[in-house]
């Protein structure tokens, strides 16, 4: 398959993003400024997936102020917008996933009819494909618009869906999810995003297998 | 572009060797186009209708040079076969139907000339073709051959002969002339029907052939792929010719798919065609007919076909079909549907074209321009425009929204094309969704290319201007975006896309420095996304919004900026910026760098706000988790604190925020106006990083009550992080802590200031006072103000300020001055100006009066005073407050009644002392009864005290009161102390107090023992509080304790411990149970076990044996003393009646008279009046006046009720001398429990002092007196008239009985005059005894006759018949005649004395 999957979004029935992961081509280029700072300050990354990468090799005692002091000489950039990294790409995928909801909610969208016609729209060279279950759970995939792969995407959607079902069927996961780190009871899976390392790895494996096939 | 169908109709070839076509076509044209054709591809397929089918007749003359003869039909698998097949179909030259027009003069002519022509024609045009073709032979017959065949000569008919030679179904005969119209129509209809059938057969056959060949080709791997494409297209064309556009569209889709597959599988190698130097973009764009005239087969065979051409060709074919469908649609909805499909395919088409570009920016730009143009073209197409206009006018049409959505989509596509062209010219819009296509990595060197000469030039006029400059480019971008938004808006669809597009417009504004405009759009965007859970987008937009605001604020701060700027707006922007920083911080998705930046920015901005600016309030909980320890503690003397922990949501090390102050407001749950603010004003660092921030909030005020959390405010400059608890109702119980907790500063606990309010253990009945015990802690204080409030609804508390006293308990009872004044609200404030030393204990006795509130709730327990005390003091110059409230039970556990008995001149008072609650026995320690005056007029003696001293266990149980009898004798009859009272002093103890004291003592010992092992402040805190909690929960067997000195409790121990803990958590807030840490929970479990073990000692099973050697000393602190002022009982007159038998014998004989003398002695010595002023006029006057005088001239500050009460029970309070009458009344009131009506019907000398009811009853009586006041004045005047008499008259009446016959005066008057008094002025007697003779009528011990004495007045004298009533001898009588005031006592000396009467035989018979 020449067309690679660029991103996968899982969206809850109430249209909240559960999980958004991008794969290509910036997946390996995950050395953003934030990570750099985290490493230099010796602080663990927020993302559990990145934890193992965030262990710094040296200068663990240096602080953010030190870092900023170092940076000050080089650039006096106090802007919160740090642009040209993978975050920009992730933002784009967020936008596309969000736009996809319009199509799902469109009165002209027929999920049954579209079982094998999952192309929702094409935007900026990215074909966005969607898959909605009868419970309102949605999977959105993005691929290159150069090739229409809607006919062959169904198994991939099913695989991702199955992985999600496995996750939510796990009673321990639900327990964890009901009470998040801040102690707030957020009332269910749909309220917060999926922050599960195993799930993330499963999705990555599925998509990587697809991309390499 | 020409979108119309090029053919104009189905091709029909005609061969007209006899020049018949002219007339034939003339007639035929009238019957065309063909209508209502119904076609079925095969039996199992659906029937399809063709409404109109146009025909195009073309002359097709057989040519002898045709190559058809060389075609090999036998081997269909041959490439040559397909080649020929394609060649035949290539030019659309093969008509679907071939028609040959013939005429014959006769049979010979037919055979010789016509038939060979037909055969040659058939050979060349029909049978010689691979492609099936229908054919018809049309015989135009003139009159010569127009003969009907006969039975005998069938062959003579030429037409029949033709039919025989060829197939009948292909032959039609037309006449040159018709006899009738009917015949004409019949003939021509037959021809048209044949045409239709032949045509439809031809369609079917051709489709069958193509499909069969396509299937065959699909199975063959090695074959020229062009065949597949051409055959597929031919199939599509057949449908198109049949005007079955939908089917044709499907075939074109198959064609596209086949093409893509062949190209993808590299079976067919086709160049994109874009990079070719021959590529003539102008021809594509400008030559509108180019695409329609494209010959696909030719290009394929010439190998000149490009992908670009193919896509264009395919799309144009499809678009023409869709437009045809639209124009021929039966309804507007279907029309719209086809246009929508056209627009959808257009969108995909443009995308496909872009995919051809292979990341070549120049090509991308060229294709983008092409796409831009083609979209414009289609949107301006007549059919599309008509449909749009139709739909715009009718939004109710179902497909209206979908159409607008696709128009929006195309506009969006145009915008995309614009951006791609813009990239070529280095125009860029940053930060938008349509930013650089991140995956096209090969789009490189574009910046390098920018330096080179541009090969691509925009030619499309509408795009030229926008691509002249970045500004124009952005304007066009915004314009297109707005058009998209407009279309989506009109469609009322794609709200999320609208939002994203709006933010993109904002981004353009931002990039152009239009920060105000950008911020206006973005102001609500991030909230919108946040609410929907799209935090990443929200966070990004918020950052842009912040950038905008920063720019705006910085511009305003710039000195060169407009000086006339709106300051309010400026502050608003700064606030918004500050809020936005906090919003961003609260998204929890910030990186460490961002958090650091934000922390600095927040500190800087909040501190830069001017003092005059309004503060900014921001919800605290969005940034910090907080935990408020709701158990109040004290670490410094008289300073209370709560601990608050703020924990950041972030996990990074970050700079701190400088906190100016943290305050927590608590609001009283009962009184919302009362609040306490705990504050920490030291500037501290608040880490927004991973650390928990612990703050200690302190207050110098302590108010004992239930409070709820109101708000927690963390002030950072002018920024207030605020948490409002108003909806949470989280409770905090505030109460004074007696000793401080050990801290770094004070390692050893110190005592705090604390107070207690109680009823003094020594109390005077009806002289109520409260005892406020002030325990000063380890800090000297001064200027102590005390105020009291009463929370009872049924009564008002009135303080008797003049009698308030204060003593220092620690300084040998030294009296301390108390000043009182009234505050602004009229409340009395007691003030102790003197300083109070460390650990000094003061006792303040506060006398009070309780006034009932009319119409108040009677259900309220009147004996429980809900007192709230507020104490203010200064400690080290700092003001402190201490509020506490307590419900004081003023009821007494003791009940006292008294019975007065007069014998001659001696009064015997029998006091009965018991318990007011039968379940709570009391121990009577000492009773004393003596005159309150040192120079008493009475001698009091008793033998009861000796009994009390002998027994140390005088316990009064519920129904077993203790009796104390006192004999009261007058020292002499000279009455010089009118107001002398006796004082009854009872020292007693509640057994429950004793038992509880022992239990508490044991508990404290247990605590001390435990503390030796575990130095736990927490334990002490729990334990000390538990003591106050369990005392009301214990159910102690007091009778058992009183008898066996064994303490047992009836409680279920587990339930008891549970109740204690539950009560404790009501105080503590449940912190340990809910949300408390594990350590707390563990401690609670341990403590519960300790409690359980402790109470096991007192369980029913075990019991606790008390072994105290010096009990009295041990329980001394529990002793209570009650003092009751008992007024001397007053009687106006006491009569002593005595029979004296003249001849006393041991027995008397029945029927024999017995002589007796009746002596009457009277005394007024207990009347409370001086001698010689006995009973009359002045007394009566004064007897009424005192209450009136009392009411009229009450003591200043005393209310009538108070004075009456004092007058009756505590004469010392009242300065008004009590008259005997009043005294009697008051005595009755005091000692009697009944209503006023009962006073005179019940035994007067037996009275009960219901101490608890006294106040209430007295108040009622006072009310009665007030009510009776007017009447009393009247009665006074009457009495005055009555009492003009100079003496008192009594009627003596001997009761007639069956026992005696009485001879002598049975009824006589007994007048008491002053002259009759003896020398001692109080006593008088009858001058002569009354002689009586009694004749016994019965034998046995017969009591002497009863005597009634009644007081007479004048009226009574006249009314002799008035009944005296049967009253038993020896009982007192009360005369009503002279009103309420007159009282007398009768002492029957012979009461119960009997005479033994025997029968005439002088014998005594005993009966058994």
Image (tube, coloured by chain):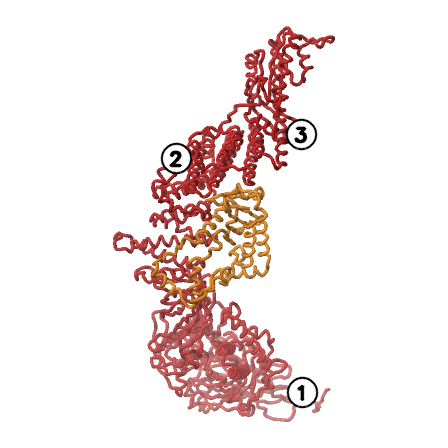
Name of the residue lying farthest toward the right:
B152
Give B1241 or A41, whichever is nearer the viewer. A41
SS for dot 1: strand
Foreground mark, 3 or 1, reads 3
**Residue A205 is drawn in which quadrant?**
bottom right
Lower sequence index among marks 2 and 1: 2
SS for dot 3: loop
Lower sequence index among marks 3 and 1: 3
Chain A representation colour: orange
Residue B73: x %, y % from top left: 64, 26
Residue B352: x %, y % from top left: 49, 39
Above/below status of A9 relative to B1082? above
**Residue B1280 is drawn in which quadrant?**
bottom left
Name the residue that disc number 1 marks: B1340
Can residue B407 be seen here?
A: yes
Name the residue that disc number 3 marks: B43
Residue B1291: x %, y % from top left: 52, 81
Foreground mark, 2 or 1, reads 2
Residue B258: x %, y % from top left: 56, 37
Above/below status of B555 relative to B105? below
| Residue at mark 2 to residue at mark 1: CA–CA distance | 154 Å
| Residue at mark 3 to residue at mark 1: CA–CA distance | 145 Å
| Left/right of residue A19 with respect to residue B196 in the rendered view | left
Foreground mark, 2 or 3, reads 2
Instruction: Tell me the quarter of the image containing the N terminus of chain B.
Output: top left
Q: Answer few, some or many: residues within 10 Å of disc 2's Cα (few below 14, many 20 plus, some between 14 and 19).
A: few
Have a look at marks 3 and 1 and say if they share a chain. Answer: yes
What chain does badge 3 belong to? B
Residue sitting at x 67%, y 29%: B43
Q: Which chain is red?
A: B
Name the residue that disc number 2 marks: B460
């Amino acid at each position: 398959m020449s067309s690679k999957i660029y991103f996968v979004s899982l969206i809850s029935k109430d249209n909240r993003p559960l999980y958004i992961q991008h794969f290509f081509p910036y997946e390996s280029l995950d050395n953003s400024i934030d990570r750099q700072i985290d490493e230099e300050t010796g602080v663990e990354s927020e993302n559990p997936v990145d934890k193992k990468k965030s262990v710094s090799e040296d200068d663990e005692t240096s602080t953010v102020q030190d870092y900023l002091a170092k940076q000050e000489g080089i650039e006096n950039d106090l802007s919160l917008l740090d642009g040209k990294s993978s975050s920009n790409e992730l933002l784009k995928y967020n936008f596309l996933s969000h736009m996809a909801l319009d199509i799902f909610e469109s009165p002209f969208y027929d999920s049954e009819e579209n079982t094998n016609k999952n192309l929702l729209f094409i935007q900026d060279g990215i074909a966005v494909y969607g898959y909605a279950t009868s419970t309102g759970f949605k999977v959105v995939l993005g691929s290159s618009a150069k090739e229409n792969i809607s006919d062959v995407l169904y198994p991939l959607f099913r695989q991702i869906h199955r992985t999600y079902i496995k996750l939510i069927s796990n009673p321990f996961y639900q327990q964890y999810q009901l009470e998040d780190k801040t102690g707030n009871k957020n009332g269910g899976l749909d309220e917060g995003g999926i922050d599960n390392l195993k799930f993330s790895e499963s999705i990555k494996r599925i998509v990587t297998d697809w991309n390499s096939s | 572009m020409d979108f119309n169908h090029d053919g104009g109709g189905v091709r029909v070839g005609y061969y007209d060797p006899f020049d018949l076509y002219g007339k034939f076509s003339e007639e035929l044209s009238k019957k065309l186009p063909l209508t209502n054709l119904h076609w079925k591809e095969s039996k199992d397929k659906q029937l399809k209708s063709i409404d109109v089918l146009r025909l195009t007749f073309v002359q097709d003359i057989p040519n002898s040079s045709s190559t058809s003869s060389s075609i090999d039909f036998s081997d269909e698998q041959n490439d040559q076969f397909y080649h020929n097949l394609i060649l035949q179909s290539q030019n659309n030259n093969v008509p679907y139907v071939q028609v040959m027009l013939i005429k014959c003069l006769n049979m010979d002519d037919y055979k010789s000339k016509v038939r060979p022509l037909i055969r040659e024609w058939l050979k060349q045009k029909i049978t010689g073709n691979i492609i099936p073709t229908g054919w018809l032979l049309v015989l135009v017959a003139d009159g010569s051959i127009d003969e009907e065949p006969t039975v005998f000569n069938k062959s003579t008919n030429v037409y029949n002969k033709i039919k025989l030679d060829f197939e009948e179904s292909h032959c039609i005969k037309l006449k040159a002339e018709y006899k009738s119209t009917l015949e004409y129509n019949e003939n021509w209809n037959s021809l048209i029907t044949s045409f239709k059938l032949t045509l439809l057969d031809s369609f079917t056959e051709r489709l069958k052939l193509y499909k069969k060949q396509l299937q065959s080709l699909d199975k063959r791997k090695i074959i020229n792929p062009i065949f597949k494409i051409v055959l597929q297209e031919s199939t599509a064309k057949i449908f198109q010719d049949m005007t079955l556009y939908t089917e044709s569209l499907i075939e074109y889709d198959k064609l596209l798919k086949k093409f893509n597959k062949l190209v993808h599988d590299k079976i067919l190698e086709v160049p994109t065609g874009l990079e070719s130097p021959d590529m003539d973009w102008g021809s594509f764009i400008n030559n509108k007919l180019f695409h329609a005239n494209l010959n696909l087969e030719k290009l394929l065979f010439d190998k000149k076909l490009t992908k670009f051409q193919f896509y264009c060709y395919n799309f144009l074919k499809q678009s023409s079909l869709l437009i045809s469908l639209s124009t021929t649609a039966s309804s507007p909805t279907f029309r719209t549907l086809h246009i929508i499909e056209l627009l959808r395919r257009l969108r995909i088409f443009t995308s496909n074209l872009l995919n051809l570009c292979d990341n070549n920016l120049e090509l991308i730009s060229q294709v983008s321009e092409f796409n831009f143009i083609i979209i414009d073209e289609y949107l301006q197409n007549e059919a599309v425009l008509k449909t749009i206009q139709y739909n715009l006018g009718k939004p109710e049409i179902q497909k209206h929204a979908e159409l607008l959505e696709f128009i929006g989509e195309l506009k969006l596509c145009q915008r995309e094309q614009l951006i791609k062209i813009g990239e070529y010219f280095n125009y860029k819009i940053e930060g938008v969704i349509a930013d650089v296509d991140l995956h096209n990595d090969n789009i490189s060197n574009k910046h390098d290319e920018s330096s080179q000469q541009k090969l691509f030039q925009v030619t499309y006029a509408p795009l030229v201007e926008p691509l002249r400059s970045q500004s124009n480019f952005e304007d066009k971008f915004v314009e297109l975006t707005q058009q998209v938004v407009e279309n989506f808006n009109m469609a009322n669809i794609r709200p999320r896309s609208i939002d994203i597009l709006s933010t993109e417009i904002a981004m353009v504004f931002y990039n152009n420095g239009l920060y105000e405009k950008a911020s206006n759009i973005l102001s609500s965007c991030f909230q919108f996304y946040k609410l929907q859970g799209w935090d990443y987008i929200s966070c990004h937009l918020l950052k842009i919004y912040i950038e905008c605001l920063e720019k705006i604020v910085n511009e305003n701060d710039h000195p060169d900026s407009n000086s006339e700027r709106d300051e309010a707006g400026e502050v608003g922007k700064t606030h918004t910026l500050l809020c936005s920083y906090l919003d961003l911080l609260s998204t929890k998705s910030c990186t460490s760098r961002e958090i650091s930046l934000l922390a600095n920015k927040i500190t800087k901005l909040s501190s830069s706000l001017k003092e005059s600016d309004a503060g900014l309030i921001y919800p605290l909980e969005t940034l910090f988790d907080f935990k408020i320890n709701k158990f109040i503690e004290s670490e410094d003397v008289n300073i209370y604190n709560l601990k608050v922990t703020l924990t950041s949501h972030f996990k990074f090390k970050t700079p701190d925020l400088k906190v100016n102050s943290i305050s927590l407001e608590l609001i009283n749950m009962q009184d919302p106006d009362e609040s306490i603010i705990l504050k920490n004003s030291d500037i501290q660092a608040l880490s927004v990083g991973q650390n928990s921030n612990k703050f200690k909030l302190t207050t110098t005020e302590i108010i004992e009550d239930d409070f709820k959390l109101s708000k927690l405010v963390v002030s950072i400059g002018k920024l207030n992080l605020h948490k409002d608890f108003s909806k949470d109702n989280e409770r905090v119980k505030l109460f004074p802590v007696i000793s401080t907790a050990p801290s770094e500063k004070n390692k050893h606990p110190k005592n705090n200031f604390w107070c207690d309010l109680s009823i003094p253990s020594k109390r005077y009945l009806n002289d109520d006072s409260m005892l406020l015990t002030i325990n000063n802690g380890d800090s000297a204080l001064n200027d102590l103000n005390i105020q009291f409030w009463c929370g009872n609804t049924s009564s008002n508390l009135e303080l008797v300020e003049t009698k308030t006293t204060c003593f220092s308990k620690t300084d040998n009872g030294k009296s301390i001055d108390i000043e009182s004044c009234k505050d602004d609200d009229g409340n009395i404030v007691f003030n102790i100006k003197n300083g109070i030393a460390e650990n000094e204990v003061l006792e303040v006795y506060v006398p009070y009066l309780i006034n009932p509130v009319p119409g108040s709730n009677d259900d309220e327990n009147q004996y429980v005073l809900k007192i709230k005390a507020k104490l203010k003091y200064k400690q080290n110059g700092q003001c402190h407050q201490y509020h506490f409230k307590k419900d004081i039970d003023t009821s007494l556990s003791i009940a006292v009644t008294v019975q007065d008995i007069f014998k001659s001149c001696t009064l015997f008072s029998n006091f009965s002392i018991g318990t007011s609650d039968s379940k709570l026995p009391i121990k009577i320690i000492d009773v004393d009864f003596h005159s309150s005056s040192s120079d008493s007029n009475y001698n009091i003696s008793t033998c009861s005290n000796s009994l009390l001293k002998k027994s140390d266990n005088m316990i009064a149980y519920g129904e077993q009161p203790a009796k104390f009898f006192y004999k009261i004798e007058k020292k002499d009859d000279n009455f010089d102390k009118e107001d002398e009272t006796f004082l009854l002093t009872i020292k007693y103890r509640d057994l429950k107090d004793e038992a509880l004291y022992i239990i508490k003592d044991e508990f404290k010992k247990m605590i001390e023992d435990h503390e030796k092992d575990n130095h736990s402040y927490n334990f002490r805190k729990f334990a000390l509080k538990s003591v106050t909690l369990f005392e009301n929960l214990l159910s102690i067997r007091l009778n058992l304790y009183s008898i066996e000195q064994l303490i047992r409790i009836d409680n279920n121990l587990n339930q008891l411990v549970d109740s204690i803990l539950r009560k404790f958590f009501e105080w503590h807030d449940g912190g340990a149970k809910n949300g408390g840490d594990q350590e707390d929970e563990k401690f609670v479990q341990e403590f519960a076990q300790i409690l359980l073990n402790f109470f096991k000692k007192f369980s029913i099973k075990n019991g606790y044996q008390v072994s105290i050697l010096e009990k009295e000393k041990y329980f001394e602190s529990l002793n209570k003393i009650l003092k009751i002022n008992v007024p001397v009982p007053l009687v106006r007159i006491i009569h002593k009646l005595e029979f004296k038998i003249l001849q006393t014998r041991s027995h008397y004989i029945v029927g024999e008279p017995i002589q007796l003398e009746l002596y009457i002695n009277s005394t007024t010595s207990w009347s409370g009046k001086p001698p010689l002023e006995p009973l009359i006029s002045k007394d009566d006057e004064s007897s009424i006046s005192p209450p009136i005088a009392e009411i009229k001239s009450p003591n200043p500050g005393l209310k009538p009720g108070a004075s009456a009460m004092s007058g009756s029970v505590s004469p010392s309070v009242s300065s008004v001398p009590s008259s005997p009458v009043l005294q009697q009344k008051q005595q009755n009131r005091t000692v009697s429990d009944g209503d006023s009506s009962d006073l005179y019907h019940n035994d007067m000398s037996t009275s009960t002092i219901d101490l608890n009811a006294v106040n209430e009853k007295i108040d009622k009586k006072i009310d009665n007196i007030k009510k009776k006041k007017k009447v009393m004045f009247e009665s006074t005047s009457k009495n005055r008239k009555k009492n003009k008499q100079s003496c008192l008259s009594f009627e003596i009446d001997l009761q007639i009985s069956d026992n005696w016959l009485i001879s002598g005066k049975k009824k006589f008057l007994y007048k008491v005059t002053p002259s009759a008094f003896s020398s001692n002025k109080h006593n008088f007697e009858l001058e002569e005894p009354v002689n009586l003779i009694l004749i016994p009528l019965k034998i046995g011990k017969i009591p002497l006759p009863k005597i009634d004495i009644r007081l007479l007045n004048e009226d009574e004298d006249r009314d002799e018949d008035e009944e005296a009533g049967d009253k038993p001898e020896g009982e007192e009588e009360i005369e009503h005649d002279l009103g309420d005031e007159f009282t007398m006592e009768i002492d029957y000396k012979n009461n119960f004395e009997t005479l033994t009467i025997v029968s005439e035989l002088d014998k005594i018979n005993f009966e058994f």
